[in-house]
Amino acid sequence: MKKLAYIKDISTGIETISYEHVNIAYPLHTHIGHIVFGIVTDGIVGVQIDRQECLCHSGEIFSIAPDVPHAIYPASDFYSMISICVPQRDSIEKELNIIKRDIIGNPELEISIADMAEKVHISPYHMIRKFAGENGLTPHKFQMQCRIRKAQELLEQGVKVIDVAAAVGFCDQSHLCRVFKKQVGISPEEYSKSAILYKPEGK
């Protein structure tokens, strides 16, 4: 039986994702402020990091640094895997971090490329290329990723999917559902049911 479950430790911010007999593929994306460790327990997982690809078999481990573009895909009919996302503070101040922080803080806002470029005093074309070079994704793709991240947090708080869609800047619920499933691997409703929040006593 296919199964995907999320466990989030609220006190540390560490997220554990358990994949059991799935064939989910994730397109090129990054993890903001998290280092990722993947442990393949069954089947074969293909991992593309930047432009390099490798196959991880059962019993093998891979890691991905923050802000590094990567894709995950099944290299066998099905795979099982445990993924651990550990928060890591970015100690390197990059030139376009001011734009990155704006998007992370308010992913639901429509910020034009022209406004972003004006803020850092460079041309829109140069800004897009430089942002992608620093963060692994174009500003638009980065914003979509941040919107889904915020959607996950709201779903964990029990907010209804239709209200989440409006809160994170999607035009409607179906648009949210399409992007959410593409990035997370399951629908918002499935995520709400599978996400487990762990908080130690006394915290």
Image (spheres, helix red, strand yellow):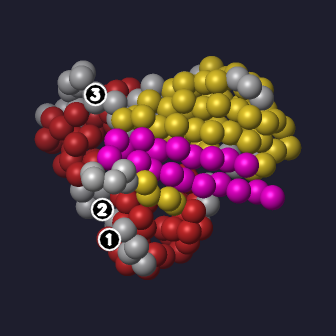
Q: Nearer the viewer, mark 3 or mark 2?
A: 3
Horizontal and vertical percent position of residue 6: 54, 53
Q: Is residue 8 magenta?
A: yes
Q: What span is colored magenta in the figure?
A: 1-20
Which residue: 27% across, 51% down? 203
Instruction: Indicate the quadrant where residue 169 lies.
Output: bottom left
Which residue: 51% across, 51% down? 7
Q: What amino acid is labelled 3 in the image?
A: Asp
Instruction: Indicate the quadrant where residue 93 lies.
Output: top left
Q: Earlier in the sequence, mark 3 or mark 2?
A: 3
Horizontal and vertical percent position of residue 194: 57, 62
Horizontal and vertical percent position of residue 78: 81, 45
SS for tag 1? helix
The vertical placement of 114 against 37, above or below, is below
Q: Which residue does the numbered mark 1 point to in the structure image?
A: 167
Q: Earlier in the sequence, mark 2 or mark 1?
A: 2
Q: Which residue does the numbered mark 3 point to in the structure image?
A: 90
Q: Is residue 24 left or right of residue 125?
A: right
Q: What amino acid is labelled 2 in the image?
A: Glu
Q: Which residue does the numbered mark 2 point to in the structure image?
A: 108
Q: Is residue 175 magenta?
A: no
